[in-house]
Amino acid sequence: MPGFEVFGEEEKKEIMEVLDTGVLFRYEFPEQRKGVYKVRSFEQKFAAYCGAGYAQAVTSGTVALKVALAVLGVGPGDEVITQGFTFVATWEAIFDVGAVPVFTEVDETLNMDPADLEKKITAKTKAIIPVHMMGAPARIAEIVAIADKHGIPVIEDTAQAAGGKLNGKALGTFGKCGTFSFDAVKTMTTGEGGMVITNDEALWRNMSEYHDHGHDHASNPGGRGGEGRSFIGFNYRMMELQGAIGLAQLAKLDGMIATQKEHKKVLRAAAAKIPGVTFRTILDPAGDNATFFAFFLPDAQKARAVNQVLKDNGCGAIYFADNTWHYYPKWEHLLAGSTLAKSGWPFNDQQGKKRVIYDPQVLPATAAIMGRLLVFQVPIKLSAARLKEMCAALEKAAAAV
Ligand SMILES: *Cc1c(COP(=O)(O)O)cnc(C)c1O
């Protein structure tokens, strides 16, 4: 899964170029930096890699979502629809701009079910955030068509699917904005970091300004101190060291994906021997970033039994039904409305009245799917011995159920 497996001389060389200038800030210091603009160059190369017009680097994938929501004008009083199988960051960002997250079911793509999306759209829906979970696409064309019909912008949470494609088109380029994470365990990593891509220049300009205290980045005789601003912002700037690592990692992304695909193919062939096994719906196998391998058993009991055999043989799979960070009924703090704010915001309004109540039972289709699901992370550096061990464990599971 993570790009940190392939850190090497390339990352070191990029970092040293930054340290040689002494400039860690992405803006300013024109003389000292000797032409080195790593974050800017990472943005340009990432946009080009995705086939997007513009890219804005930020400090995390969570912030990337927040910045996208902010420039789309989403705020208090609004609803944003996402899916009940995602990392908590997706709904944290929605709450952070003051809006309320509404959750849809997932289908066997393990991503947003378009039919359920349609049911959950209200007059208050101001954005839709499908998530390309675990490297493979949501039914993004259908989702965008539904959103367009209602005039609602789509933000693709592509945090887990850098390099993923659907019919040759990069994930993250179907909606109004695509957001990425480069945190420590993502397919490509800068330690911490994120990116928002878009084809809309005006939207990108607002991202650039919002993420840097409103600075308009128009060259000015007074330098940075003399720059203008037209709205309030915040500080979500990426630093040069992250941009440097990003450049090295981006250059390796296609190679990482190719290796993961080879490993995944071997695992899939071994898992195929388990009676009753089926596989996650991958809309475009060629565009899968292959960071994860997901398969289903006929029911939850069988899934747990298979995983027990895998665990006993040193190769336990992820069982997302029990995972507290990625699955709606396990988010006890969301369900309970736990917050540090004395007013109870964002779960309560300023009068202390509940704005939103979450019920763990409302996503039965997702619950059924999660109960049957087992997932392996697909490592890049996988020794022949370990791969053999994993295949042997899958074969033992096949014989046991
Ligand atoms: C990792 C992740 C994020 C958040 O990214 P960070 O860089 O860790 O803030 C958002 N959404 C999904 C689906 C993720 O997996």
Image (cartoon, rainbow, N blue to C red):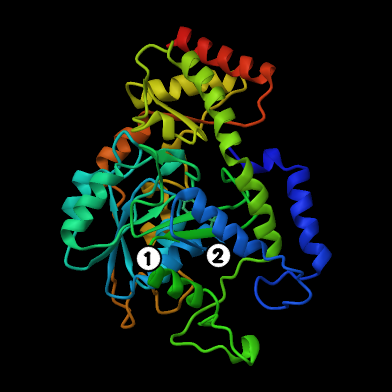
Q: What residue occupies the far top of the structure in this picture?
A: 399
Please state the horizontal and vertical placement of residue 80, each as a whole percent of the image: 30, 62
Of residue 28 and residue 180, the one placed in the foreground of this image is: 28
Q: Amino acid at mark 2?
A: Val
At 47% from the left edge and 49% from the top edge, which residue is drawn?
A: 50
Of residue 256 and residue 359, the one placed in the foreground of this image is: 256
Q: State the quadrant of the C terminus.
A: top left
Categorize mark 1 by other alpha carbons within 10 Å: few (<14), some (14-19), many (20+).
few
Q: CA distance from mark 1 to mark 2?
A: 17 Å
Q: Amino acid at mark 1?
A: Asp
Residue 338 in view here: no
Q: Against 24, is 400 above or below?
A: above
The tag on residue 225 is: none
Horizontally, residue 219 falls left or right of residue 275, namely: right
Q: State the quadrant of the N terminus.
A: top right
The tag on residue 58 is: 2
At 55% from the left edge and 77% from the top edge, which residue is drawn?
A: 212
For marks 1 and 2, the one nearer the N-term is: 2
